[in-house]
Image (cartoon, rainbow, N blue to C red):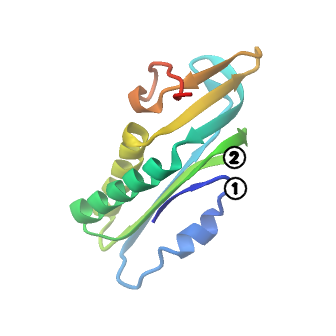
Amino acid sequence: MFRISPTPLDPAALQRALADARAGACVTFEGWVRNRNEGQPVLSLEYEAYAPLAVSEGEKILAEARVKFALLCAVCVHRTGHLALGDLAVWVGVTAEHRGAAFGACRYIIDEAKARLPIWKKEHYASGATAWINCATRGEHGGAEARPPA
């Protein structure tokens, strides 16, 4: 299941949905709003998404991961709207028979989501400036700015 949520996420409830007696491993990932990026103090973030395409492509990513890693279950939920520091922005959870598959699948899903989904992040800085960040082209420590289409 992939979905876009305008409301706060409940990681405990999401993880309960993964329960499966066949599973030997459950791996989850939580992406939180942090207070700095590229040396600038960040106060908050805004996420916008083109939900119909994001959900369709998100489901494709999960289906690919299920096949590639022999998953029992895969879930990804991404927030939209204005998020405060420490808020949960994205949650990924997978179950598999073995831990290696679960770790690999979780990483695959978040990396593909960042690269392929029409979801945009706007950072609000302590200086009062804002910037749209292009998640698709960002590596761990850098990247290009982009703005969502009007």
Residue 101 screen position, x and y as percent = 28, 62
Please give the name of the residue rendered at 41% of the width and 45% of the height, measured from the top-left corner. 113
Say what secondary structure mark 2 lies in. Answer: loop
Q: Amino acid at mark 2?
A: Asp
Q: Which mark is residue 49?
A: none
Q: Amino acid at mark 1?
A: Pro
Please give the name of the residue rendered at 33% of the width and 64% of the height, measured from the top-left corner. 99
Residue 79 screen position, x and y as percent = 61, 49
| Vertical position of residue 138 compared to residue 87: above or below | above
Residue bearing the label numbered 1: 8
Spatial CA distance of label 1 from label 2 is 8 Å
Residue 73 screen position, x and y as percent = 38, 71
Residue 61 screen position, x and y as percent = 34, 54
Labels 1 and 2: the sequence-earlier one? 1
Which of the two residues, 121 or 20, is positioned nearer the viewer here?
Answer: 121
Residue bearing the label numbered 2: 87
Q: Quadrant of residue 144?
A: top left
**Few, some or many residues within 10 Å of mark 2 (<14, 14–19, 20+):** some
| Vertical position of residue 53 compared to residue 120: above or below | below
> Pointers 1 and 2 in contact (CB under 8 A)?
yes
Please give the name of the residue rendered at 54% of the width and 24% of the height, measured from the top-left corner. 147
* Position of the N terminus by quadrant: bottom left
| Vertical position of residue 123 compared to residue 106: above or below | above
Left or right: 79 as drawn, with respect to 58:
right
Mark nearer the viewer, 1 or 2: 1
Left or right: 132 as drawn, with respect to 1:
right
| Residue furthest front as drawn | 150
Left or right: 100 as drawn, with respect to 138:
left
| Residue furthest left as drawn | 68
Q: Quadrant of residue 37?
A: top right
Count every numbered label the image shows and give the total: 2
Which of the two residues, 2 or 13, is positioned nearer the viewer here?
Answer: 2
